[in-house]
Amino acid sequence: MPSLDPTGAATGVSTTDPSAALAALRRRALGVLAGLSGDAIELGELFRAAGHELALVGGPVRDAFLGRLSADLDFTTSATPDETEAILARWGDAHWDIGREFGTIGARRMPGGRRGSTRDVLVEVTTYRTDAYDPSSRKPEVVFGDSLEGDLSRRDFTVNAMAVRLPDLTFVDPFDGLADLARGVLRTPVDPRQSFDDDPLRMMRAARFAAQLGFEVDPAARTAATYMAERIAIVSAERVRDELSKLLVSAQPRVGLEVLVETGLADHVLPELPALRLEIDEHHRHKDVYEHSLTVLDKAIALETGPDGAVPGPDLVLRLAALLHDIGKPRTRRFEQGGGVSFHHHEVVGAKMVAKRLKELRFDKATVQAVARLTELHLRFHGYGEGGWTDSAVRRYVTDAGPLLERLHRLTRSDCTTRNQRKAARLSAAYDDLEQRIATLREQEELASIRPDLDGTQIMEILGIGPGRDVGAAYQHLLELRMDRGPLGEDAARAELLAWWEARTAG
């Protein structure tokens, strides 16, 4: 995970000389850019032949200095969108209008396609531009620019304001982005107040890149973001959601979340998070829920699996649930007699708060429901070690979690942040036992698809009734029996059904 400093440590370059670190970065970039697809070089030649400039910009250039070649290539050009589209039509196997009003056209060359490419090359080409927000609008105003340097000046940070002109691979760095890359600093190309005023989402990007790259936010940029935090309200919920999601699935989301909270941005985009910083009473009888939540997030990330595992990381649903599972605590906090503190039913209150916030951020319905459900269920396990659960309780736990069970396992385990080693070991052992019981019952009963021993058609046939509420009630009764007693078999289920029906009709 890169975290550059003046010694070049984050690049894998071991040196105490900043100039040597820069030289090493340049050598690394040259090695990566030398492997840049001939398809991209050819594209540069087509633009030049048509009298236009073309340059590789942004993340792909930054990543080249970090030793990575991006699969998707972003370019900027002096050509208009119509001129760009005409050139891409000649270059690619396919091209499309990504956002003509923003000056962006996309194209693709595919292995074995009609252009003879040996690899998959996806490009986006955007006309030089400047953009800014009107104080009364949520959408940026786009004005096409006339120079590469002007286009780079509107980029969010200097490390993303570097370019490589094509086809001759000339490096362009008007704002010393390479030096900032070597130092691991996020600095804006222009005055941060102007930059953040032009596009307030850049304040959230500072947090996101801090999480992704491990960089420090420049003091001037941090001060500007703190002063201008409320300006983020002008940005659409969809753009805020996308930036927050990218932050959460990054390498170290805690770092970015701390930037959001410390600058006050979180007060406007995710106010439930800073609200978790409950004041500690003088006797320290309850812990800081904010720090606890960040620790749960870290632990949940550590429990994510590889691509073939039960919860492949990065898993946005699990990370959202880990971060937000306790947001109901501030609303349910009560100081009890004797100095204790309680948060009764905070999981239920929290689930409703999670759903409300994620809907406001325009998350999709499935994500909203999953995170809210995990929040509601995260306390269900507590008490298992002390009282012991019947097989019926284990079945209900699995059934209630449904497809979220593996995430719930990880959330519940991560929620144990006690420093008491004996307590932590006891909780871990208890959950090990629960998982083993689930595995045993699953082998015996197909827990993931628990159904009554009789279906609706059989119920109607046995009782001699047609579709209606009585069928649903009978089905639910048999399901409850199945949960409590396990598989009954059709004969026993038939007898139970008839006895239930006799009692129901007699009443």
Image (spheres, helix red, strand yellow):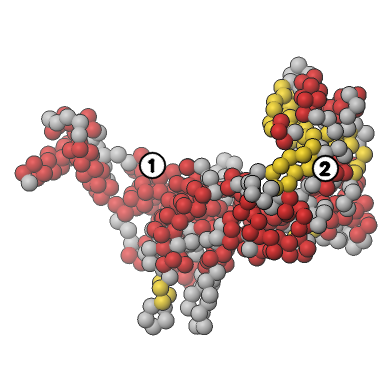
Seen at 60% across and 47% down, the residue is: 236
Q: Relative to 239, is 377 above or below?
A: below
Q: Secondary structure at mark 1?
A: helix
Residue marked by disc 2: 151
Q: CA distance from mark 1 to mark 2?
A: 55 Å
- Say which residue appears at 70% left-offset and 25% top-offset: 96
Side of 128 where 299 appears, left or right: left
Would you name the residue on which mark 1 appears? 448
Horizontal and vertical percent position of residue 448: 38, 42
Q: Which residue shows up at 40% across the image and 73% down it? A: 334
> Crowding near pointer 1: few (<14 within 10 Å), some, many (20+)?
some
Image quadrant assignment for residue 72:
top right
Quadrant housing residue 44: top right
Residue for point 52% across, 61% down:
272
Question: Does residue 155 appear in the picture of this structure?
Answer: yes
Q: Is residue 321 left or right of residue 233?
A: left
CB under 8 Å between discs 1 and 2: no
- Residue 389, given in percent of the width and then of the height, sits at 32, 58
Q: Could you tell me if residue 212 is visible in this image? A: no
Q: Amino acid at mark 1?
A: Ala
